[in-house]
Image (cartoon, rainbow, N blue to C red):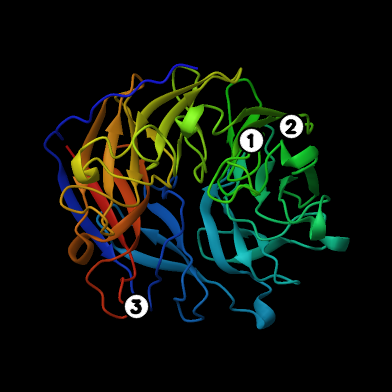
């Protein structure tokens, strides 16, 4: 397993703009998920913090210029039957409606799957923990994907059929007609060698199979909490055949990284790319990796290669491939003049591992702790920060922002 580390380059000319400063009214603390561009050209996302009229999260629409409209305020129903704390963002299906999950709420306060029309009408499709001992899973964090067969796939962070109270997570499928199936319960293997606690959204590759990550589990016993494991990459077919492709911290001193909080993308070369929040060769500040669908992993970059972590540290978000073939992502911390301060960076990295820091965030003016990035059809990059910004209605760290980056 080759390890490739390249020094970060100077950033090209970029234009940064803060488009939205979230507030207690409009929403706060967007979750760790990217915005999406809808069929109408507008951007859509969710906020998961204590915000909105019901203080339990919102779904919103935003024009490319930054005009924000609330589509839905969660927990509008008695008992939060419509969900609370939306997580994982939303996906627009072929029928034009949006689909997503909430971390809490529903009939048993274990989260829901919902459908939301562009006009803002929400329907609860499924309430988790509907089965005895929550064998169907509970507390979903990662969002949904719609596969080529038209069905939706996702994960729950906890629940399932294995272990004490089944607290290891699941992979599930739900049809547009609301037929729900648990495809896999994690920790089905000894010592959770197959992984546990999936956190991020899934991705369907061109071969038709679905790929994802778990934050914990795997065959390595080394990590900050050695009882949890270091995380895995897995493959599952639509029929539920499960394969563990890789266990992190398989290399000495965890040079390959560990704790993959983000999901995967498939690039145009057919390989999968992602990040780990910790590990690497430079003191444990996270990595960018490439893995083939056969399970061969290459570490492309270890963060904090530059003095005072000017290149960033702790990437918690996934990647996106731009129209130029370059990959883009964010780090939660680090950046120029931001060592040990909550700033964060946006970066680009080539498939060969050459990293360029595109932007270092200024907490008070631009937000901090960026959580995601995406590219719109006009080439503009859009992303969100979970905290910071100039609005004072939230906690001392701020409510978060939406930003754009253009060359």
Which type of secondary structure does the marked residue at label 1 adopt? loop
Q: Position of residue 204 (x, y in %)?
A: 60, 31
Please name which of the two marks, 2 or 1, marks the residue nearer to the observer.
2
Sequence-wise first label, 3 or 1: 1
Query: Mark 1 — residue?
Result: 147
Residue 42, placed above or below residue 358:
below
Asked whether 255 or 153 is in front, the reply is 255
In the rendered view, does 82 fall on the left or right side of 305?
A: right
Which residue shows up at 36% across the image and 20% down it?
A: 4
Query: Mark 2 — residue?
Result: 238
Q: CA distance from mark 3 to mark 1?
A: 38 Å
Q: CA distance from mark 2 to mark 1?
A: 9 Å
In the rendered view, does 172 fall on the left or right side of 66?
A: right
Sequence-wise first label, 2 or 1: 1
Query: Mark 3 — residue?
Result: 394
In the rendered view, does 148 fall on the left or right side of 7?
A: right
Local crowd size for mark 3, using a 10 Å CA cut-off: few (<14), some (14–19), many (≥20): many
Residue contact at pointers 2 and 1, CB within 8 angstroms: yes
Residue contact at pointers 2 and 3, CB within 8 angstroms: no
Q: Position of residue 25 (x, y in %)?
A: 38, 78
């Amino acid at each position: 397993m080759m390890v490739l580390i390249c020094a970060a380059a100077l950033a090209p000319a970029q234009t940064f703009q803060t488009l939205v400063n979230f507030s207690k009214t409009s929403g706060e603390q967007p979750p760790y998920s990217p915005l999406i561009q809808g069929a109408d050209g507008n951007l859509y996302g969710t906020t998961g913090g204590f915000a909105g009229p019901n203080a339990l999260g919102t779904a919103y629409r935003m024009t490319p210029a930054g005009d924000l409209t609330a589509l839905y305020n969660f927990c509008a129903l008695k008992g939060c039957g419509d969900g609370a704390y939306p997580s994982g963002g939303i996906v627009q299906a072929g029928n034009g409606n949006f689909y997503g999950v909430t971390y809490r709420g529903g009939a048993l306060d274990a989260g829901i799957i919902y459908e939301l029309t562009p006009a803002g009408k929400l329907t609860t499709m499924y309430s988790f923990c509907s089965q005895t001992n929550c064998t169907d899973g509970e507390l979903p964090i990662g969002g949904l994907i719609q596969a080529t067969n038209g069905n939706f796939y996702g994960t729950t962070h906890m629940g399932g059929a294995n272990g004490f109270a089944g607290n290891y997570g699941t992979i599930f499928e739900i049809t547009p007609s609301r037929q729900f199936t648990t495809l896999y319960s994690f920790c089905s293997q000894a010592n959770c060698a197959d992984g546990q606690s999936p956190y991020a959204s899934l991705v369907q590759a061109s071969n038709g199979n679905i790929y994802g990550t778990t934050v914990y589990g795997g065959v390595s016993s080394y990590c900050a909490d050695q009882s949890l494991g270091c995380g895995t990459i897995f493959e599952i077919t639509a029929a539920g055949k499960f394969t563990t492709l890789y266990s992190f911290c398989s290399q000495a001193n965890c040079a390959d990284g560990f704790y993959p909080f983000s999901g995967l993308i498939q690039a145009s070369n057919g390989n999968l790319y992602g990040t780990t929040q910790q590990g690497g060769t430079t003191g444990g500040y996270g990595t960018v990796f490439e893995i083939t669908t056969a399970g061969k992993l290459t570490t492309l970059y270890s963060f904090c290669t530059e003095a005072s972590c000017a290149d960033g540290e702790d990437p918690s978000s996934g990647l996106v491939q731009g129209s130029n073939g370059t990959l883009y992502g964010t780090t939660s911390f680090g950046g120029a003049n931001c060592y040990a301060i909550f700033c964060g960076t946006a970066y680009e990295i080539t498939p060969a591992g050459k990293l360029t820091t595109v932007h270092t965030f200024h907490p008070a003016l631009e937000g901090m702790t960026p959580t995601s990035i995406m590219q719109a059809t006009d080439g503009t990059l859009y992303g969100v920060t979970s905290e910071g910004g100039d609005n004072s209605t939230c906690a001392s760290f701020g409510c978060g922002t939406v930003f754009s980056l253009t060359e």
